[in-house]
Amino acid sequence: MIIIIFIALICNCYGQIGQTICSDFYESECFQSGYCYWDDFQCNPQPCHLVTEQNACRTGGALQIGCKPVSYTPPQFVASCYSSAYTKQKIYLYRFISDLSPEDRFQTSVTIEQPSVEAMEKLYKLDLLSSSNFELNNILDSYLNQAPILIGEYSHPYYLERAIYESLQNVRDDLKIIKSERSDTMIKILELIDIYYQRLNTYSEKYSTFYNFVNFNHIHFKYLGFSFQNLIELSWTTYPENGFFSLTVIYPQIFGIQSAVSPIFMIRTTNQINLQYTMKWAITTTDFVQLRRIDLVSMNLYDAEYLPNCISGYCTVSVYGPGNYLFVTPTIPDNCSGITDLTLCILAKCNIVSNACV
């Protein structure tokens, strides 16, 4: 009889995991729940992709109405949930797991000396994913101060790539920062991307790597072009001098941009050489589309001075020099009050009031 009662108690406790609504938690319980967060006043439900306790998204769970558990998650990502408004997890919402050693996890500050290989190696052990926005900015400042070493032969590109995608993930998932704070951090992330491509100039003539919501491509002008995942082709016939063409592909949804029908194509050329090239994008929508520029600090979109020719499943446009471009459906708004996807509302650093974005 005692054994039966003990088993029953275990089953009852297990059944309660993920079922308590967030507003019933005190602060310490809120942090430990795996599906709630504390906003200085009360405990609130996490956005689905930030949930780590999948029971909360299952039948009987506290978030069962708004979230569903991801059935399979690749090992490099955190197992989480996805919004019931979606049919599956969006590629831009997966969360990387830190590959730091256990003793380095949650280490978010260190004393950094003058630029040196030893100081660079200390930077590599800092946990950007768990950093507050204040700590993240300090870490990025340290990376920028180490630029002379980071562009040198002792720096491997992977560690810069990791710092970039982890910083972007941190900014995407920080529920407390406002737009101006995101802008301040983005300035530093963009500077780090520039340092990264300087490193690639001496690392390889042809290089690409993929990290879901941000991907990197770097190629010498002499190759006269390349394609990215059958999504976009970039080509040129001549070049005024030797140099490199760099393409960073970023999913605009991580910034809450609703109108986008393509990734952001962040294009850089060595010394801002005014290279003339052609972009050929494979159309992914039946809607009318336009090419827009985007300011990756303010996240404002502007009409591009180039008009694409969209026919037979492709949009082709001739472009000069560096720039940040994306294709959008111009009738879809990106201001807070016009965002209908509540996940994008959160990523745009807007607020949700009465189930509407404001």
Image (cartoon, grey):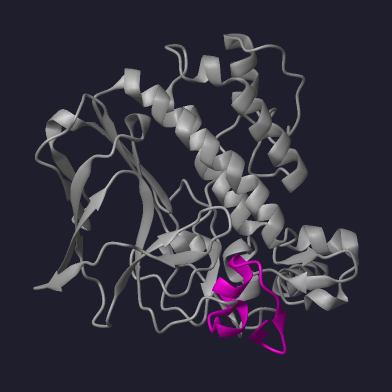
Q: Give the farthest residue toward the bottom.
A: 354
Residue 131 placement, left or right of 210? right
Q: Is residue 207 above or below residue 291?
A: above
Relative to 90, is 129 above or below? above
- Residue positioned 64% across, 34% down in the render: 140
Can residue 132 be seen from the camera position used here?
Answer: no
Q: Which residues are magenta?
A: 336-358
Q: Is residue 343 above or below residue 191?
A: below
| Rendered residue at 70%/39% (across/down) | 137
Residue 318 placement, left or right of 172: left
Residue sitting at x 53%, y 14%: 149
357 in the magenta segment: yes
Q: Is residue 90 left or right of residue 209?
A: right
Q: Is residue 50 left or right of residue 164?
A: right
Residue at the (21%, 26%) spot, across then down: 241
Quarter of the rendering occupied by the N terminus: bottom right
Q: Position of residue 152 (x, y in %)?
A: 45, 14
| Camera-side residue of 90 and 30 | 90
List x then y, in percent, for residue 43.
83, 70
The percent coordinates of residue 171 (x first, y second) are 62, 52
